Amino acid sequence: MEPCLNCGEDMQSKYCPNCGQKEGLSPRSVVAAFSDLIGNVFSYDNKVWRSLVLLCFRPGKLTKAFCKGQRSRYFDPLRMFLLMSALVFLAPDTISVGEYRLSEEWSQPAPEGYHFGERLRIGSERVKELAESDPESYITFLNQVTKRYLVFSFIVGILSLTLFLRLIRFKIYLVEHFVFALHFCSFILIANLLLRLVMPNSGFTNVEAIFMTVVQVLYFPWAYLVVYSKPGKKNRIIAFLVSIVAMCVFFAPYMASAQLSIFYVLMPPAS
């Protein structure tokens, strides 16, 4: 076989043993290039698809495999979280969602001397007023704020969960707890994305809220038991109870930051 065209290494198979480049020149036609791209994207060997299947259908297995050192086979956890965050923004309901504009009165600066807490209180009162007076605009507003601050809220929850797990499981490396939190958030984003693709332009409905709550409550303890539980019935019961606490540690800061972001958008600017 001819040497690798990229690094000059002797080729002993279809791929270079040194740099991994495929033998031969690049496809010379658009059809060949497109066919090669489709084959790579939808190939079973593609680490993105392999990681997504494991993440969705075998909770905790991807985290466990990554922490055991099987990292080249699967997609990087941080990249997966960022990719899923970007894809959620492109879901049909977020593309077509309208934009809520503050009224001229609400855009005025707060009276001089009002500190951040007072302005935030005004923002919370405006949220309640908007929800009661114009529910349609309120739904648009929620979608708009969620889209803008989703990643920030997840980061708050990820950091809180990582630190809590480090506190109770201090013998495990901090980065492994971080990977567990990233994988859980990636799963939430995937579930939300699939739901919004099935129900475009749904906004914040009771069906969506119930579905996401059930999925998260079932997934988190399952993944936690796979990653952290030791053998034995007693250990698994303890691990299950701890997983409920850990789930609350994630969702409490996450929901608090999401709520604060809603108040923050509607609060009057500083004078």
Image (cartoon, helix red, strand yellow):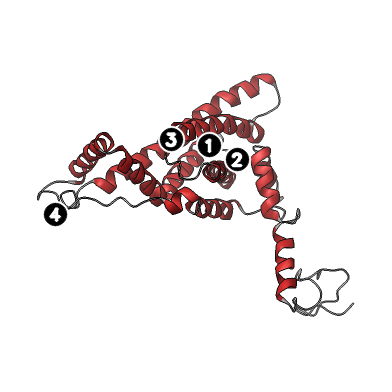
For the residues bearing labels 1 and 2, Cβ distance under 8 angstroms: yes
- Which type of secondary structure does the marked residue at label 1 adopt? helix
- Which type of secondary structure does the marked residue at label 3 adopt? loop
Picture layout, residue 175 above or below residue 249: below
Residue 161 x %, y % = 49, 39
Q: Which quadrant of the structure image shows residue 124?
A: top left
- Alpha carbon of mark 2 to alpha carbon of mark 4: how far? 49 Å
Q: Residues within 10 Å of mark 1 (few under 14, many from 20)?
A: many
Amino acid type of the residue tagged 3 in the rendering: Thr
- Return the residue at label 4: 271
Front-most of residues 231 and 56: 56
Picture layout, residue 237 above or below residue 228: above
Residue at the spot x=81%, y=74% of the render? 23
Q: Earlier in the sequence, mark 2 or mark 4?
A: 2
- Alpha carbon of mark 1 to alpha carbon of mark 3: how far? 32 Å
Residue at the spot x=87%, y=80% of the render? 2
Would residue 85 appear left or right of 15 to someone viewing this image? Answer: left
Residue 175 x %, y % = 57, 47
Amino acid type of the residue tagged 4 in the rendering: Ser
- Return the residue at label 3: 205
Q: Earlier in the sequence, mark 1 or mark 2?
A: 1
